[in-house]
Image (cartoon, rainbow, N blue to C red):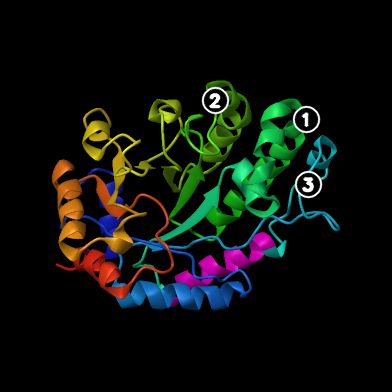
Amino acid sequence: MNRRERFYAAVNGEKLDRVPVTTWMHFVTGYMTGQQSAERHCEFFRHYGFDLAKAVSDYRYPMPDGMNAINTVDDFARINSVPVTHPFLAEQINLLEGIRTELGEEWPVIDTTFDPIQQVLRRAGFSTMQLIFDNPASARPMLEAATETVIGYVRKLKEIGVDGVFYSTRAAATEKSTQGYTTQAFEELLQPYDKAILEEMKGMVRMLHTCKNHLDLSRVDDYPHEVLSWADLDPTCPTMAEVRSHNDKCLMGGINQSGVIEQSIDQIRHDCDAAIAVNNGQNFILSPGCTIGSNCPDHVLATIASYARP
């Protein structure tokens, strides 16, 4: 099997020669052009030989001129939708096209994007969360604008032939989690927008990443997706075995994204082997439960990459 065949076989629950392996980290590329970022990504993919060319997103949603934060309810209405020609999106598209050109068709290209609240607050600051929680009706135009932006971007991803999207949402993060959501807040501020975006992604592989900890995965049971990703080794989250016992979708995880940097090689292998065994080596992608820190040492990445060899 080549990488593309292996990826789609895992997603579709078909027989595998081995599980696909991937990991990702931020390369501090926000100041670079998309092509420069593509070159850095591809160097990483080629060196370690991972199965997925998963791009990270270092470009940020633009703020209106003269506005550095969302401080008042009136500021919500100043956040507008953004066309795909804006550098925030255009450079990410250039990154993805650059990866495809460099690596060819044999490597599945995966983009990363975020729920509407994360889209805006990754630039404006997550201190705005409480203002959104306290004023959900006033925040609605901002969320609609961000959703419109992501939907337009998703349509462009289809045009350029991206294989899948790693869609990060905090929908399953309960109020016990930092920046988590009550059930009411989830239903009002995330659920309808997430579903609209995921429906637009139909035709690509939708890799639903339920970010954070203290997760209630039942919240996303009816979200359209082909692959489910979460921090399965976080003690506040459902384990891989618990989810596999009632979920027949392709699952993604097995690597402790927060602890792997300090783990021994034997510990890393133990976690990887356990996750592969739970899934019987099928319908599974070996990966971290979220982004690995950019300070991850080579021997850790090399240990993970060893699972990508025959």
Observer able to see residue 241: yes
Q: Residue 101 vs residue 19: left or right?
A: right
Looking at the rendered image, the disc whose residue lies closer to the viewer, 1 or 2, is 2
The residues tagged by marks 2 and 3 sit, at their Cα atoms, a distance apart of 26 Å
* Earlier sequence position, callout 2 versus callout 3: 3
User: As shown in the figure, which amino acid type bears the numbered disc 2?
Assistant: Thr
The residues tagged by marks 1 and 2 sit, at their Cα atoms, a distance apart of 18 Å
> Which one is in front, 190 or 93?
190
Q: What x and y, as percent, mark residue 148? A: 68, 42
Looking at the rendered image, the disc whose residue lies closer to the viewer, 2 or 3, is 2
The residues tagged by marks 1 and 3 sit, at their Cα atoms, a distance apart of 14 Å
Cβ–Cβ under 8 Å for marks 1 and 2: no
Cβ–Cβ under 8 Å for marks 2 and 3: no
Give the residue displayed 41% in from the left and 34% down from the top: 214
User: As shown in the figure, which amino acid type bears the numbered disc 3?
Assistant: Asn
The magenta span reads 88-102
From the viewer's perspective, is residue 109 above or below residue 98? above
Q: Residue 94 vs residue 264: left or right?
A: right
* Earlier sequence position, callout 1 versus callout 2: 1
SS for callout 1: helix
**Would you call the spot at circle 3 few (<14 residues within 10 Å), some (14-19), or many (20 or more)?**
some
Which residue of the protein is positioned furthest toward the front in this rendering?
262
Residue 94 falls inside the magenta stretch: yes
Question: For mark 2, what is the residue?
Answer: 182
Q: What x and y, as percent, mark residue 232? A: 31, 42
Question: For mark 3, what is the residue?
Answer: 80
**Would you call the spot at circle 1 few (<14 residues within 10 Å), some (14-19), or many (20 or more)?**
some
Question: For mark 1, what is the residue?
Answer: 138
SS for callout 3: loop
> Which one is in front, 74 or 39?
74
Which residue of the protein is positioned furthest toward the top in this rendering?
184
